Image (cartoon, rainbow, N blue to C red):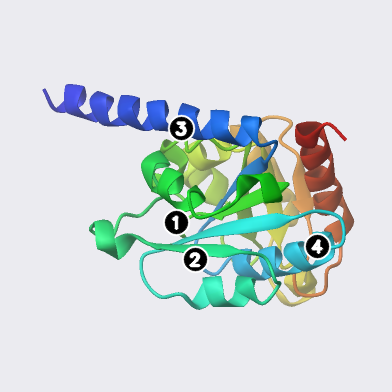
Amino acid sequence: MEIQVVKKVLDANLTVANQNRDRFSRHCVFAINVMSSPGSGKTTLLEKTLTRLAPEFRAGVVVGDVSTTHDAERLARSGAPVVQVNTDEFGGDCHLAAHVVASAIDRFDLDQLDLLIIENVGNLVCPAEFDIGEDAKVVVLSVTEGEDKPVKYPLMFRVCDVAVLNKIDLLPYLDYDRNAAIDYIHQVHGGMPIFELSAKSEAGFEGWLDWLRNGIRRKIGG
């Protein structure tokens, strides 16, 4: 009986996710779901990304947090429209479900966007289990975390399309085996593209931005 209940929840989520996907397609919006553990530098990555892409594309952001509007306030300084979702209003959920994203995107004029960034709630477990209708899933890992995170949380790396290895500017000061981290990622998801960069210094940023540009242009037909 418990398994049937879980299946119903996931089926209901998938139905709404497909509706979200249809909306993004109708309005030619490239939607990405960005996930990470807390402290990976995800918000800094998105701040720099919004600033760098602003001259070329129109972007909006949905920010998921259990509580506070801190990340949303930082991202709004880029000039992009931002919608905050605090999950403590729904019992402190550790992820954004498709119906929550559907409510958030009602707040945007999708005809005025080329890119929608969904910053999911910070953890490497729950967000991986819920399709929200995005075009691509992105996992952000930093060199201040353990190299073996990909094999400890394999579902996250299995379902994501690309990985960002952030904070590479700190590598000279850390006992971190970069090659081991990459090998662990590819053990879980063979051939997964990995962008090694520093959101702080913007070293290595171009590959990540080019991947986004290509995704947006495919979606808008440019």
Q: Quadrant of the C terminus?
A: top right
Q: Amino acid at mark 4?
A: Ala
Residues marked 3 and 1 touching at CB (< 8 Å): no
In space, the residues marked 4 and 3 are separated at their CA atoms by 27 Å
Give the quadrant of residue 187: top right
The numbered mark, 1 or 2, whose residue comes first in the sequence reads 2
Residues marked 1 and 2 touching at CB (< 8 Å): yes
Q: Nearer the viewer, mark 4 or mark 2?
A: 4
The local secondary structure at tag 2 comes to loop
In space, the residues marked 3 and 1 are separated at their CA atoms by 20 Å
Q: Which residue is mark 3?
A: 17
Q: Residue at x 64, y 57 (%)?
A: 60
Q: Amino acid at mark 2?
A: Pro
Q: Nearer the viewer, mark 4 or mark 1?
A: 4
Residues marked 4 and 3 touching at CB (< 8 Å): no
Q: How many marks?
A: 4
Q: Amino acid at mark 3?
A: Ala
Q: Please tell me the numbered disc located at residue 54.
A: 4
